[in-house]
Image (cartoon, rainbow, N blue to C red):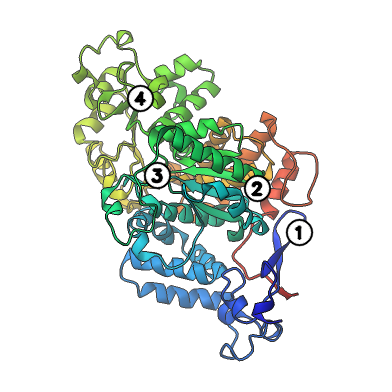
């Protein structure tokens, strides 16, 4: 068979009863096989495959193993002198050979996560147009959104299970990036594969390009996105509705993760499609669960109940309010009323304490009535140190994107309310963190419990290096997605993320807790993802929202035993699959 005679799709997947890929049927030969990143094995094509796929003579005679390819890829990666250079190398490898790329990432996940995702992916967003090499994912804009269903159907043969979808407006603390925001989706989906075993061919990155208000992009002659100011109002709503209808029709069982929308739109989109799609917003719910996991670990160390703490979220955007929502859910589960839970949660933004008169729509439920605060008389009473002292804050959380705002004065104010203060400067990238862990330990004589949002080097405490736990959403969303798929969920409930947070906290070892470490190590991502998936699946069964597993023939009554089997057996590992010529 020649390349010109290939059928509509040059390959197809064969699945086992659990929906895991067992082999690939290949309808093309020669360059058609090598130029497809799913079927390409490079020097690892064995002798039989080289004969049957008409590759004989196209490679040197020696057949390399995947392990050899990974080792040599690591050598090549080591020659790259910048993080952006390393990012480009891994993305190029992914575009050429997805199995090898994921095997490489898996071999050093702790370090390479910083390259494929935060902080390096932010630079990739900014340089997207100049770095563009090959088509990756889907780009919808007003000129093609009416054909969304037709376009999505082109991916139906890939059995899409997870899509990460962004409108590119609220990217990683750097804001509106136009078409470049799709780099975030690509990175997140690589982490779905690493953390949850969702095979790359089941993943779909989607950019909803509704324009950009960044003048530098609109004036850049090389910009690849839709050259138009961002559409708003009814026009934006109509655009979103057309995408959502098409996605649900083409992929009714797939999970849609909303990513990096602006703070108010993030809540509106999440809530608008809460019951119409299997969807969640990682910036809101994933961030909330990751932070809650760190808090739960801190409570184990402090030996204090979470319902006795007073929380302050500094930075009341999508992530900050998402954290507040998740803390509220956890407190209600502990027996507090909704009103009692919210009374223990304070939110601050650039105006100071969020009160009824200045609250934005997404902040309203966590705003305070000044009449109920005897210590609040004027705007200055809503600044950070005053609120900490007056409200008795014991857990301080930073999502402001404001570098260095957790000063010595601020940290010591929390320490006045607790012998073991919990300080969580979660803003990322690293340079935007509200405080540096080493400073917090110095100011509190090592008594504070600290976790960050971005990676920091270990800090020497008591004569030994102590790892700084990272409240990274990667501990949440891959496993949550796997649990949702395995449980056949019809909707995504808030309780899923509380369950996920508890599962992550349970992955922190006794030794780490003894050292004051609040989060698991990055190299345990696979195990964490498995435990989170089971916890989310159990929550779905208990919540009555689970259904038949949609991606295989493993049809049984929902049970925890069935769920455990599915979570284990549906995972893809970066190993070469048999290629069967057809």
Work out whether mark 1 precedes mark 3 in sequence or the reverse, and give the earlier one.
Answer: 1
Q: Whole-Å distance between the Cαs marked 2 and 1? A: 22 Å
Which residue, given by chain and number where applicable, does mark 4 sit on? 360
Work out whether mark 3 precedes mark 2 in sequence or the reverse, and give the earlier one.
Answer: 2
Callout 2–callout 1 Cβ contact below 8 Å: no
Which residue, given by chain and number where applicable, does mark 1 sit on? 16
Q: Residues within 10 Å of mark 4 (few under 14, many from 20)?
A: some
Looking at the rendered image, the disc whose residue lies closer to the viewer, 3 or 2, is: 2
- Does residue 71 appear in the picture of this structure? yes
Looking at the rendered image, the disc whose residue lies closer to the viewer, 2 or 1, is: 2
Q: Secondary structure at mark 1?
A: loop
Q: Secondary structure at mark 4?
A: loop
Q: Which mark is residue 250?
A: 2
Work out whether mark 3 precedes mark 4 in sequence or the reverse, and give the earlier one.
Answer: 4
Residue 239 % position (x, y)? 49, 40
Q: Whole-Å distance between the Cαs marked 4 and 2? A: 35 Å
- Vertical arrangement, residue 79 with respect to residue 8, above or below: below
């Amino acid at each position: 068979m020649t390349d010109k005679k290939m059928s509509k799709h040059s390959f197809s997947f064969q699945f086992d009863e659990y929906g895991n890929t067992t082999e690939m049927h290949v309808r093309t030969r020669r360059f058609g096989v090598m130029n497809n990143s799913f079927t390409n094995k490079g020097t690892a094509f064995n002798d039989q495959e080289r004969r049957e796929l008409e590759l004989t003579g196209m490679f040197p005679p020696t057949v390399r193993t995947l392990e050899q390819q990974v080792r040599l890829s690591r050598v090549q990666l080591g020659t790259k002198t910048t993080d952006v250079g390393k990012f480009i190398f891994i993305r190029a490898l992914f575009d050429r050979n997805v199995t090898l790329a994921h095997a490489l990432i898996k071999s050093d996940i702790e370090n390479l996560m910083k390259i494929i995702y935060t902080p390096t992916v932010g630079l990739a967003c900014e340089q997207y147009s100049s770095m563009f090499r090959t088509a990756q994912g889907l780009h919808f804009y007003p000129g093609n959104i009416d054909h969304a269903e037709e376009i999505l159907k082109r991916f139906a043969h890939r059995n899409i299970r997870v899509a990460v979808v962004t409108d590119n407006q609220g990217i990683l603390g750097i804001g509106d990036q136009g078409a470049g925001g799709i780099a975030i989706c690509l990175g997140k989906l690589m982490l779905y594969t690493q953390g949850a075993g969702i095979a790359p061919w089941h993943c779909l990155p989607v950019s909803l390009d509704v324009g950009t208000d960044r003048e530098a992009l609109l004036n850049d002659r090389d910009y690849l996105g839709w050259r138009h100011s961002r559409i708003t109002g009814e026009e934006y709503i109509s655009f979103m509705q057309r995408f959502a209808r098409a996605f649900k029709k083409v992929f009714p069982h797939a999970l849609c993760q909303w990513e990096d929308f602006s703070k108010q739109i993030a809540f509106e989109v999440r809530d608008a499609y809460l019951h119409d799609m299997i969807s969640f917003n990682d910036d809101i719910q994933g961030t909330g669960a990751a932070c809650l996991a760190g808090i739960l670990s801190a409570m184990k160390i402090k030996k204090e109940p979470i319902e006795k703490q007073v929380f302050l979220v500094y930075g009341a955007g999508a992530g900050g309010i998402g954290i507040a929502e998740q803390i509220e859910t956890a407190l209600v589960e502990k027996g507090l009323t909704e009103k009692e839970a919210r009374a223990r949660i304070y939110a601050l933004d650039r105006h100071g304490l969020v009160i009824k008169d200045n609250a934005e729509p997404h902040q309203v439920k966590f705003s305070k009535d000044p009449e109920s605060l005897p210590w609040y008389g004027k705007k200055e009473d809503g600044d950070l140190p005053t609120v900490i002292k007056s409200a008795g804050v014991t857990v301080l959380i930073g999502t402001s994107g404001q570098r260095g705002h957790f000063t010595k004065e601020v940290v010591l104010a929390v320490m006045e309310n607790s012998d073991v203060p919990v300080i969580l400067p979660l803003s990322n990238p690293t340079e935007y963190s509200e405080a540096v862990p080493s400073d917090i330990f110095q100011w509190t004589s090592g008594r504070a419990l600290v976790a960050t949002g971005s990676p920091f080097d270990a800090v020497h405490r008591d004569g030994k290096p102590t790892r700084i736990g990272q409240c990274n959403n990667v501990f949440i969303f891959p496993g949550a997605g796997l649990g949702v798929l395995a449980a056949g969920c019809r909707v995504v409930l808030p309780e899923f993320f509380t369950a996920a947070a508890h599962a992550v906290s349970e992955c922190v070892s006794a030794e780490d807790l003894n050292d004051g470490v609040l989060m698991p190590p990055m190299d345990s991502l696979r195990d964490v993802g498995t435990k989170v998936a089971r916890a989310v699946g159990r929550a779905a069964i208990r919540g009555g929202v689970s259904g038949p597993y949609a991606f295989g023939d493993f049809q049984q009554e929902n049970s925890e035993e069935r769920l455990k089997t599915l979570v284990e057996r549906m995972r893809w590992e970066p190993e070469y699959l048999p290629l069967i010529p057809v």
